Every structure is written in C-alpha cells, then in structure tokens.
Amino acid sequence: MIAALATLLVFQLLGEALVFVSGAPVPGPVVGLALLLFTLVLRPTLVTGLKPTAQTLLQHLSLLFVPAGVGVMLHLQRLGDEALAIGVALVVSTWVGLASAALTMAWLIKRVQASKDKA
C-alpha cells in the first residue's frame, strides 16, 4: 500500500512540476492523473498494484471533502456577498458544458453515420 501511495503521489508531483515549468492553466493533479492514465495504458500490469489502494481511497473519499466544507464555513459571509456572481457563473458554465457535450455528440454521430454510409 505504501508503494502504491508513493506512486500516486509521484504522479501528482510530476503533474505539479510540469504545470509549474510550462505555466499551463491546468491543475497539476489533473496533469498527473493524465500521466498516470497514459502510464497505465502502456503498462497495464501496474493496475494490480494500484487497485487496492485506489479502492480504499475511494471508500473514504467523503473525508476529503471536510477541508472544503470548513473553507465554505470560514468564508460564508464572502460567499453570501458574491452569491449572484457565483450563481451566474455556475449556471453559465453548466449550460456551456451541456452545449459543448451536445454539439460534440452530434458531430460524432454525423461522423460515424458518414463512415457507415461509405462502407
């Protein structure tokens, strides 16, 4: 379990380092997760070593939300002051996400249908 945790943390560190060096506007853990995914695709045997630790972490995922809840309680007044801006940002980003997913799906359906028509 220690080796698996170390592996996960090393990939997070690699992601953070790459973001720091490149200045990419992406969170380091996301880049680290992408690197981990790429590594697991290339070497699927690593999955067996990481799976039990990952499952244990997922079972206790709710504990990771405690710091976020404390942060919300700490800044509750600020959240109240900026509720309109936060609400608008949430609604607009949700609609943009839904629209981009729908447009991507429509484009993929057309592309698959076109390739079936050619065959």
Image (cartoon, rainbow, N blue to C red):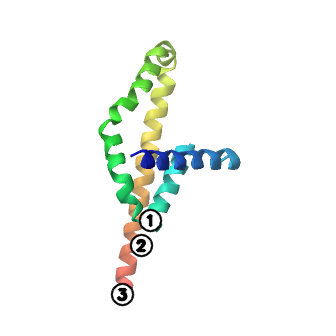
Which residue does the image show at 40% across and 48% down from the upper left? 98
**Figure disc tally:** 3
Which residue does the image show at 35% across and 83% down from the upper left? 117
In the rendered image, which residue does mark 3 sit on? 119
Label 3 near label 1: C-beta < 8 Å? no
Mark 1 Cα-neighbour bin, 10 Å: few <14, some 14–19, many ≥20:
few
Structural distance between the alpha carbons of marks 2 and 1: 26 Å
Amino acid type shown at disc 1: Val
In the rendered image, which residue does mark 2 sit on? 111
Helix, strand, or loop for circle 3?
loop
Structural distance between the alpha carbons of marks 1 and 3: 30 Å
Amino acid type shown at disc 3: Ala
Vertical relation: 60 (above or below) 22? above
Which residue does the image show at 39% across and 78% down from the upper left? 114
Which residue does the image show at 51% across and 47% down from the upper left? 30
Label 1 near label 2: C-beta < 8 Å? no
